[in-house]
């Protein structure tokens, strides 16, 4: 059943990519400096790429899938994914997430979300102090772009 949900999610990503053409027309215009983050002793996440493939019908765009693993209490540094369209599916555990200007949302195993190009991810954390959380993340990005750019630390 889970593989059907993942397949359905990937189909939704592919459909959205085709409909939108995954263009970078929604340029990020926010010029305010992000708030300084204090050095954290919490563990961070790790990203393991699964597949990276140029999209044959969308010149200059690449499809990348990856597993993002959050050990217990892990928290990602605030970051962006450039002009990539991002789809995230919770494979295991519970993750709390917030995009700039949006409310904090908690996602459990089997739930998913999307991030529009240029989105600023200000919070991503594993809510458990004992269990891992794992995400399947799909990026539709400009070929050659970094998939994740952490905010500069003050």
Image: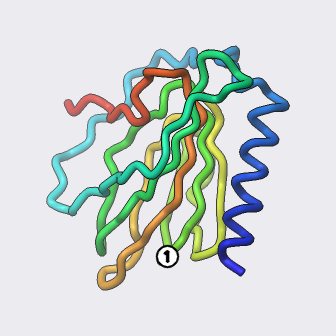
The image shows residue 69, relative to residue 30, as above or below, that is below
Query: Does any portion of residue 84 appear in the rendered image?
Result: no
- Residue 149 drawn at (x, y percent): 36, 31
The image shows residue 45, relative to residue 139, as above or below, that is below
Colour convention of the picture: rainbow
At 62% from the left edge and 42% from the top edge, which residue is drawn? Answer: 115
Figure label count: 1
Q: Quadrant of residue 69?
A: bottom left
Q: Quadrant of the C terminus?
A: top left
At 41% from the left edge and 58% from the top edge, which residue is drawn? Answer: 68
The image shows residue 143, relative to residue 116, as above or below, that is above
At 54% from the left edge and 71% from the top edge, which residue is drawn? Answer: 91
Q: Which residue lies most toward the bottom here?
A: 130
The image shows residue 45, relative to residue 14, as above or below, that is below
- Horizontal side of 123 relative to 23 (left or right) equals left
Element type where label 1 sits in the image? strand
Residue receiving disc 1: 92
- Residue 126 drawn at (x, y percent): 39, 68
- Residue 17 drawn at (x, y percent): 74, 34
- Residue 151 drawn at (x, y percent): 33, 32
- Horizontal side of 109 relative to 75 (left or right) equals right
Question: Local crowd at mark 1 within 10 Å, few (<14), some, or many (≥20)?
Answer: some
Q: Quadrant of residue 58?
A: top right
Of residues 54 and 17, the one nearer the viewer is 54
Of residues 77 and 15, the one nearer the viewer is 15
Q: Which residue lies most toward the right here?
A: 19
Q: Quadrant of the N terminus?
A: bottom right
């Amino acid at each position: 059943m889970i593989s059907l949900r993942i397949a359905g999610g990937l189909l939704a990503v592919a459909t959205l990519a085709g409909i939108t053409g995954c263009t970078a027309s929604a340029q990020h215009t926010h010029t305010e400096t992000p708030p300084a983050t204090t050095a954290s002793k919490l563990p961070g996440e790790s990203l393991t790429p699964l597949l990276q493939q140029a999209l044959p019908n969308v010149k200059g765009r690449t499809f990348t899938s990856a597993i993002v693993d959050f050990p217990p209490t892990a928290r990602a540094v605030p970051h962006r994914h450039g002009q990539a369209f991002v789809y995230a599916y919770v494979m295991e555990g519970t993750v709390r997430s917030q995009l700039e200007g949006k409310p904090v949302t908690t996602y459990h195993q089997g739930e998913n979300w999307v991030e529009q190009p240029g989105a600023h991810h200000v919070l991503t954390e594993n809510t458990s102090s004992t269990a891992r959380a794992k995400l399947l993340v799909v990026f539709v990005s400009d070929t050659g772009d970094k998939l994740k750019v952490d905010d500069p630390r003050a």
